[in-house]
Amino acid sequence: MSTIAQEHVRGKSVFKDLSADDEDWQPTEMESLCMNCYQNGITRLLLTKIPFFKEVIVSSFSCDKCSWSNTEIQSAGRIQEQGVCYTLQVRSKQDLDREVVKMDSATTKIPELDFEIPPFTQKGSLSTVEGLLDRAVAGLEQDQAARRAADPEVAGKIEAFIQKLKKLKDVDKEFTVVIEDPSGNSFVENPVAPLKDEALTVSWFRRSIQQEKQLGLRADDEPEDEEPPGNDLDTMRSEVLVFNTNCPECNAPASTNMKLVQIPHFKEAIIMATNCDSCGHRTNEVKSGGATEEKGTKISLHINGPSDMTRDLLKSETCSVLIPELDFELGMAALCGKFTTLEGLLTDIKDLVVAKNPFVCGDSGDSDRMQKLKEFGEKIEKIIAGDMRVHIILDDPAGNSYLENVYAPEADPEMTVETYTRSFEQNEELGLNDMKTEDYLEDN
């Protein structure tokens, strides 16, 4: 394989947006060995950018000699800060058509069959739920002929299990598909976007040290109990700390600045900003500088006009955003922590749900769904312009989010702030439960 030119790596167009209009952007073809007949076949590589997933490498192999073919997808972007877990309740055959991006680092589970595909045992794929089942069946059937000859009893048990997997596609009864990816780069389609998907639960988690070693983020010989070096708190308050990183867009060398700041009438927060000189990409992220509060916080604001758009807003990574009038809910960690304005948050929501939705872009987008998302984007624009009166709710179980009170120190007549006791499940998501889940279930 030819090497990628250095000027391409440093911000040029090695990875392009996937588009049917760019006829000059063709896959790279090369001869490679067929692992089925050991003759030469053709591998095609396409380096592209799918919105929301950043850069990906799509590869396809085909052999004219034995007709064997294979496709896979690999993430060429950065590993996300947290792992992601998708839990899908498959209730109808329509759910089998949901598109799925499954990276090689993901674990796939079907609890009802006590079935699990461990990480790094399959290549990454862009498929559907039905495709995941077919791939699992194909993997089990691969060596059945040899098993029948060597151990008919084991082959019979596997055959019975294969039939159970195939039976799932009839959806005679509900079953669960869980995709847990410590890299955070897998994805399961929400066909009713921008509305909340009642059949799909998305949660984010901190990687274990073992998972970080599997992803190459830690050295294999690094002690399990070793903590990363900390920074002096007084230094963080008085100075801007600079770290060398890579740009999440073009992968060129960049720098991340970090500063601990005091937000008026609230608390300290850590603001991080990444600037890339090569492609001009800029990002900012905010994390709470304090501990998790004793109670969760729910902030509700009645938006009356454009003047509300200038309110300062701190959304932590644990905060959900709801707009009841649009029947819209954005779960925690769908957007990273941000210190912005209300207008900035609404713009980010529009970009995430509409512009960066990978399953409604290009020629493959469903026309009805694209129309719904277009209408949703237009409603967000009306809210920003002050032409639509709605409520926006920030629900943060960690209590680390904030919305500016423009009447401070007096009460804000358009805003309510409530505190509440977290549920067991919320404590579990925040990693605050000392008691094991099974003990809790026994007690309740």
Image (tube, rainbow, N blue to C red):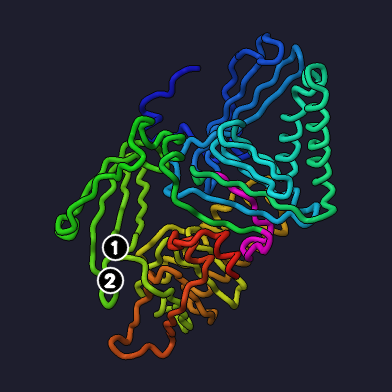
Residue type, numbered disc 2: Lys
Q: Is residue 412 visible?
A: yes
Residue at x-position 80% and y-position 46%: 168
Coordinates of residue 75 in the picture (x, y in percent): 51, 37
* Element class at badge 1: loop
Give how far apart the Cα atoms at labels 2 and 1 are. Answer: 8 Å
Name above or below for residue 444 compared with residue 202.
below
Residue in the foreground of this view, choosing between 12 and 331: 331
Left or right, 231 with reference to 169: left
Tag 2 near tag 1, CB within 8 Å: yes
Residue at x-position 81% and y-position 55%: 173
* Magenta residue check for 198: yes
Which part of the image, by quadrant, shows the C terminus?
bottom right
Residue underneath mark 1:
289
Classified by dominant secondary structure, the portion drawn in magenta counts as loop
In the rendered structure, find residue 267 and report the number of the disc placed on it: 2
Name above or below for residue 222 compared with residue 306.
above
Q: Which residues are magenta?
A: 185-199
